[in-house]
Image (cartoon, rainbow, N blue to C red):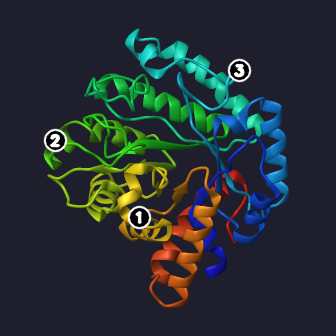
Amino acid sequence: MIDRIGQLFITGYEGETPSEDYLAFLERQNPGGIILFEENCNPHSRAESSLQKISARTNVPPFIAVDQEGGRVCRFRGVPAEYGAPSDYAEHDKIDLYAEHFSRSAYYLRSLGINLLLGPVADLNLNRDNQCLQGRTFGSQSSRVIPFIERTIKIAHKAGLLTCTKHFPGLGAAKLDPHEELVSADYTYQTFLNRESFTFQAAVRSGSDMIMTTHLLLPSLDNYPATISQVVVEKLLRETLAFDGIVITDDLLMKGADRFGNHGERAFKAFHAGHDILLFGRNYRAADEAIQYFKQAYRKGLLDSDRLRSSLNRISGIKSKLTASVV
């Protein structure tokens, strides 16, 4: 099972194309997925060529993930992949137009080799000072957001894309940006049940394959931020919302995760909290360090075999939808 530990990680690469070092890392560690950023995606033909190189160097077909939310968060630029900001469609009640534009993008992404959409965004727009979510949400009221969440997941699945709803348990009430620092929001468990939970419940009912947490501290709920909180992952997500799919971290290279320890430590804490997949942005060397940390922990008996098997089985189950199994 130690040889499958890489399946717990998703990571990307810097620059326009994958380096030979990165491709060798894929062969050596067999990570569970690849994440693409804007510099990797344009022009589209180069991205497609890069994905073919990656495919040739991986033993187990990886998740190929991308943030393609619309508006300012579009890694693939230009038609037919790019479309408008979620807030613009929602503000004008243009759900059918959104569905048309998103559908065009989803089918095109799948044709390029993408199989995992890091979306939809299920956060509510609750704080006007929240620059991180500006333009990225479908509104401030769950009743208006839910139809967009449901349509997004339905269309993505029809196009052959897996979905990853974010940012659990809800980043909308925060003011700061987890890319820059650990953020906090002052809402209680009861507030979560009456407000944030509804959009994520809709995503679970609609069959979202994954749910992403973020580097958010909720002092009224737990002393630990969501990334390393068993309360958030196990109680709120697994028990309260009855979600049995893959739970993935937000990028563990964000500054909001810096206080969780070195690369191996922060990944290990997130895994211990209940996450199945650990995300390491552009820095595959950091992911490599974390994988080595996990393998050493496994050899020392510090990584619970049943817990590891459970996550690997979830990953295998989701990958079976892509006609490839983690074996």
Task: Report if the CB atoms under discs 3 and 2 are less than 8 Å apart.
Answer: no
Report, in whole angstroms, how far the alpha carbon at label 3 lies from the one at label 2: 40 Å
In depth, the one of 24 and 205 nearer the eye is: 24
Which residue does the image show at 55% across and 56% down from the upper left? 280
| Left-right relation of 136 to 218 | right
Q: Position of residue 12 (x, y in %)?
A: 65, 51
For this orientation, the residue located farthest to the top is: 92
First in residue order: circle 3 vs circle 2: 3
Residue named by callout 2: 191
Q: Is residue 173 visible?
A: yes
Residue named by callout 3: 80
**Amino acid marked by disc 3:** Pro
Report, in whole angstroms, how far the alpha carbon at label 1 lies from the one at label 3: 36 Å
Report, in whole angstroms, how far the alpha carbon at label 2 lies from the one at label 1: 24 Å
Which residue does the image show at 62% across and 24% down from the upper left? 103
**Amino acid marked by disc 1:** Ala
In depth, the one of 186 and 317 nearer the eye is: 186
